[in-house]
Image: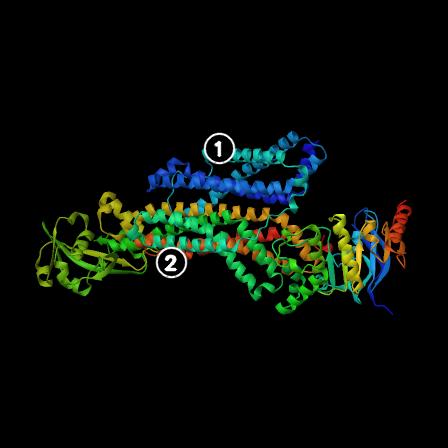
Amino acid sequence: MTREIVKTQNLHKVYDQNSERPYEALKGISFTVDEGDFVGIMGASGSGKTTLLNILATLDKPTSGSVQIDGNDITQLTSNEMSDFRSQRLGFIFQDFNLLETLTVFENIALPLSLQNIKGRLTNQKVRESAAKLGIEELLAKYPTQLSGGQKQRVAAARALVSNPSIIFGDEPTGALDSTNARELLDTLKNINRQGVSVLLVTHDPFSASFCKRILFIKDGKIGDEIQAGNRDRTQFYQEILEKLGTFEQ
Amino acid sequence: MLLKISLSGVKSRWKDYCVLFSGIIMASAIFYMFEAIALNKKFVSSTTVGQNARAVFILGSVLLIIITLVYVFYANNFLMSMRKHDYGLFMMLGAKRSKISKLISFETLIVGAASTLLGIVAGIGLTKIVSSFLITSLEIPIKYFQAIYVPAIWTTLILFMILFAIAGMINAGVFSRTAALKLLKSENQTDWKQPKTKRLVIQAVLGVLLLSGGYYAMYDIRQLQVGSIWIGLITIVAGTYLIFNSFFVMLLERIQQSSLNSKGINNFTIAQLKFRIRDYTKILSVVSLLFALALGAITVGIGFQSDIPEIANGNNAYAISATNPSAKMSSLIAKVEGKTTSHYQQKVTDKVVYYRSSDFNKSPLKYSAFVLKGNQAGLSQIKTSTLKQLKDPQSPAYQQLSSLQDPSLKSRRIRFISDTTFDQLRGRTNELQLIRVKDINSQYRSLKSVMDLQKTEFGSQTVQLMGESIVLYSMLKSMFSSMEFMGVFLGIAFLAMLASCLMFKILSGAQSDKVRFEMLNKIGTRKKVLQHSIMLQILGLFGLPAVLGLLDVAFGLQMFVKANLLYHAYRTFAYSSIGFLVLYLIYYGVTVLIYQKIVIPKTRSEK
């Protein structure tokens, strides 16, 4: 049996609960992500996908329901435990790279490790491994301002990978990239996924989504539909996503 | 319509605006406080140091205007960093540049005018508090001093309005030249460049050399005379700049290479600090120099005051002398604590004042004399005289005794005779009481009341000529206390100003730091760690100028010590710097709190 990396049950999130007009962003979401899965979450703006990602990433707490990541119920964690959990178990890739300009590429990638107080030699080894996976070993001594957008995003991916996370969350990771660089990054993510790392991507871009194995469509706080790539090639899957979006968003 | 939107923009960020407002209020309050003294000619010229004080205040005003200029510039930057995005958005929506420019100038002026007016009100209150505190705690008699002083109100208002009008025009200019898109995305732009190592090393070495050269020049004031001040001024200014631009950066690079760097987010903290220091070189240099000036002014001001007992005692060993004191005088003398009284019997003829030798053998007369150490003038010391010394009219002991007698006896000779001869002399026997006190400072009030009574008995002209140390003491006190008042006042005004400047420069960078801290939070940095990092970064920016400033003063005081102007320079320095640092620390704390509030992301449950 495959291991469940993410398991959510009946997630609800209500904003402004005590006000006159509470807003329910999530209305009972349940799904699982298995080890080695590559899941896309698609939906229009305001559908609740960012809320869902924030809860999965321990940046927000659900109003009710449970979230388990790698067997841990993250809704019960304290603020410090959530921080530690993020640095040890989760990887993030953001839309706008979020690299620190004053640190070298090496130091940027090493950041999650130093949060765990991992020492010099091991850090060095892990950073190099991670950089090698993304083909950016020769950039390690440079500063982010000396890099192109695509290179920056690969550095961000290396940082997400460096602490061997259970899962990598991507929040529109190709949003700030041109098509060549976007494609390169998605290929890289696909490669990482092939090596056994689970990936969860939040996007509204069908091209990015077509790299996933499975796509969940969210509408008005609920999972409206789900499609699987199965044995089809990417172009066919892309077509299906487009069709689905066409009907789904009506 | 746009005006309405613009005002609603202000409303929605009123917390940030509060920071801005309070800063400008502070600046204008301080400026007012300063001008309330500087412009008050009656007050300034009524002080004993009158004319010198005017020069000090003109210089002070010029310096304060320069700092205010820098300050308004930073406050304005802070304002713009908040508004760029909004205005960019208006322009994207099709607002005309000319309209936007008007709006910006208008907003800048309104913000400036409102806070300056509030600042003047605060300044009046502040002036009242500070001056009454100084007057009561330093016992400074101050005439003509007014907290509400109309010329100062106008000067403050006009200066600030001019500054804000200029700032408004600059802002309008910037906006009309910058593309809307660039404004919208301005927060994402950084211009970090790794400095070149070779240049850093050269600058660092040069900086250290210049600074130590300047320190040496101040130390060696005897040889260099006035030149030492000029050399010091130039080398220290240049050296300070280079030290911030390179030496501290290299120091941080060293730390980056150590194992300390890999702990927690130390590497982030240190790298940020390194970046900041280079970015802030100018303001940090200015802060460090002003810190030194302000602390120096306070230290020297108080230092002169603490010299008074030495100078007064150096003039005469006895605080009070009384011949046949009246009952009233005796009761006043009785109130003086910690005193030793010597009694000497005296008979007076037309030309001679006779004393019993035995009295002087029993309680020998103390006198003050200068002791030369090598070829340096040393402190005067209290010595005990022998009868033989006393008999020599040229001796300091004899002259001191002469000056302590009843003023009417000045022209008579003094003779010391045996008890039998004394008893055979005809005439009334007077009693001369000479009173020494351990601590003239603490007994000032009771001694002064004795002196005041003497003034009514003999006339104040006559008392001024007497040798009692209390006479010189009270004269110096009134002279130096106005210097002390100005020194402390100047110092506090400068400190408040420079610390506000630094605070705003730092806070204006907070907006662009937000995204970094959000990212660190997302990758799992604990809140405590983030707070700690901010505390350290800001500590670096506050601490380094303070360290350099303290060093500047420590060496600068040598000028006063070597020129024998201050006797307890370093004791005073210790006290004044503690007081100074406490105030400075408060600024640091406030900056940290505000900064943390701006940049540290709230967890959703806190929202």
Q: Is residue B73 left or right of residue B606?
A: left
Q: Using the image, name the chain to which the residue with label 1 belongs.
A: B
> What type is the residue that disc 1 sits on?
Trp
> What type is the residue that disc 2 sits on?
Arg
* Colouring scheme applied when the structure was drawn: rainbow
- The picture places residue B125, in percent across and down from the top left corner, at 50, 42
- The picture places residue B75, in percent across and down from the top left corner, at 56, 42
- The picture places residue A52, in percent across and down from the top left corner, at 80, 55
Name which residue lies at 48% across and 56% down. B201
Quadrant where the image shows the N terminus of chain B: top right
The residue that mark 2 highlights is B571
* Nearer to us in this view, B205 or B8: B205
Q: Earlier in the sequence, mark 1 or mark 2?
A: 1
Crowding at dot 2, Cα within 10 Å, few <14 / some 14-19 / many 20+, comes out as: few
Tell me if I can see residue B248 in this picture.
yes
Q: Is residue A52 left or right of residue B477?
A: right
Residue B181's place in the image compared with B563, above or below, is above
* Nearer to us in this view, B366 or A114: A114
C-alpha span from label 1 to label 2: 40 Å
Residue B285's place in the image compared with B95, above or below, is below
As drawn, the label of residue B154 is 1
Circles 1 and 2 on the same subunit = yes
- The picture places residue B46, in percent across and down from the top left corner, at 35, 39
Q: What secondary structure is marked by label 1? A: helix
As drawn, the label of residue A215 is none
Crowding at dot 1, Cα within 10 Å, few <14 / some 14-19 / many 20+, comes out as: some
Q: Using the image, name the chain to which the residue with label 2 belongs.
A: B
